[in-house]
Amino acid sequence: MADSVLVAGASGYAGALAARLIDRHPHFELAAVTSRSDVGTRLDELYPHHRVSKVLEELDLDTHADVDAAIVAYPHGAAAPLVAALRERGVKVVDLSADFRLHDVATYEQWYVPHAHPELINTARYGLPELHRESLHGADLVAGPGCFPTAALLALAPLARAGVITDAVIDAKTGVSGAGRAATAKTHFVSVDENVAAYGVGHHRHMPEIDQELARLGAEITPVFTPHLLPLDQGELVSCYVTTDRAIDQDSLAELYADAYADEPFIELVDRPPGVRDVRETNLCRIQVHADERTGKAFVFAAIDNLWKGTASQAVQSLNLMVGRPEVEGVEP
Ligand SMILES: NC(=O)C1=CN([C@@H]2O[C@H](COP(=O)(O)OP(=O)(O)OC[C@H]3O[C@@H](n4cnc5c(N)ncnc54)[C@H](OP(=O)(O)O)[C@@H]3O)[C@@H](O)[C@H]2O)C=CC1
Ligand SMILES: CC(=O)N[C@@H](CCC(=O)OP(=O)(O)O)C(=O)O
């Protein structure tokens, strides 16, 4: 029997895509899509390309919580109360926000806002299946990783697990959809078009998440992380420059990554620099490694689609594991 799934915040970029993936999924049934400002509008009026005809409704827990699972696509801070209400009613949840990613509530509150449900933090699993698959099987609450942490952690995990990283620089580029549906002075067409600029310099909210997850993988470092905004709608590239405690030649580096990702359906190892177009509208992460003889550093480049592998399709990948379905179902490469 199909598992019914609610998508809350479906009028936003990530929620709308999640609704489309659930609607097309062979096992899940899209039970309802909710929003505050677009109630009564068909989702395909807002996003014709997703071709989901369901009408957006105002969230009503009395009716909408009668589902097996939910994807919550609210901004951070707004997500936690809904997640808590859904968990209270026994609904499995993938939360796309940052509310349950950081294990330490003080760190969360330092970088975000006061946390409404800190008691749930330790019940959440980090939804990066390639690195934490076992913990996602049967999980009730999964925190979808940030888009930059997804790409950066997939890029760095084999070296981190090998215990060889002493330092890293993560230079990141992203498309504008990462900022969500509402335009701001920073994301307005006129600001972004024909332009490229760094942002969040020295204080981007994904820093503590990357630090936390790298430490879990065995690299207790504070990497440099700087994102740049590009005039793209979707797509994200991280260029990582890694200092290691020993020399690693190209063959050893390539072998390390080939072994680490041998059975991963969504990781593509390639021998030329990946571009965001190579992975557009897929759940793939495409990675190239380069042992740089001149500097002795390991270079790792990773490209994802921020809305897909960076959030919505990765959420479906996790949801598959949470309910015991094949991991690739509905998000096949
Ligand atoms: N875009 C991306 O690439 C990524 C996004 N994420 C995360 O996914 C979540 C959704 O992001 P995205 O789709 O880009 O954002 P959007 O701004 O496009 O969408 C946010 C959604 O939440 C609703 N919403 C906004 N404020 C509130 C509130 N206070 N209470 C309830 N609902 C609210 C909005 O609709 P309405 O105002 O009508 O209710 C809308 O449906 C965020 O937590 C984001 O950080 C994570 C990784 C990547
Ligand atoms: C272009 C742009 O602004 N991108 C966003 C990406 C946010 C994201 O991945 O989501 P979370 O907020 O859920 O971590 C940013 O840099 O904040």
Image (cartoon, rainbow, N blue to C red):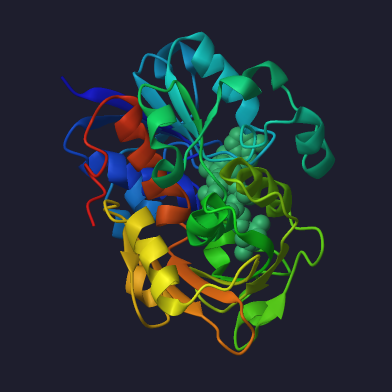
Q: Nearer the viewer, residue 52 or 193?
A: 193
The x, y position of residue 239, in whole percent, is: 57, 74
Image quadrant of ligand 2? Answer: bottom right
**Residue lying at 61% horizontally and 77% vertically, measured from the top left:** 297
Give the image quarter of residue 308.
bottom left
Q: Nearer the viewer, residue 50 or 153?
A: 153
Name of the residue lying farthest toward the front: 246
Above or below, 249 relative to 34: below
Relative placement, left or right, of 174 versus 115 is left
The percent position of residue 138, horizontal first and vertical second, equals 36, 21
Whether residue 234 is visible: no
Q: How many marks?
A: 0
* Horizontal relation, residue 29 to residue 184: left or right: left
Q: Quadrant of the N terminus?
A: top left
- Quarter of the C terminus within the rendering: bottom left
Q: Residue at x 65, y 34 (%)?
A: 99
Where is residue 282 shown, x and y percent of the image?
Answer: 32, 60
Picture layout, residue 308 above or below residue 301: above
Asked if 143 appears above or below 264 in the picture, the reply is above
Q: Which residue does the image show at 82% across and 63% down from the upper left?
A: 202
Asked whether residue 236 appears in the rendered view, the answer is yes
Where in the figure is residue 176, as x and y percent of width and height?
Answer: 57, 68
From the viewer's perspective, tell me whether residue 152 is left or right of residue 277. Answer: right
Residue 250, quarter of picture = bottom left
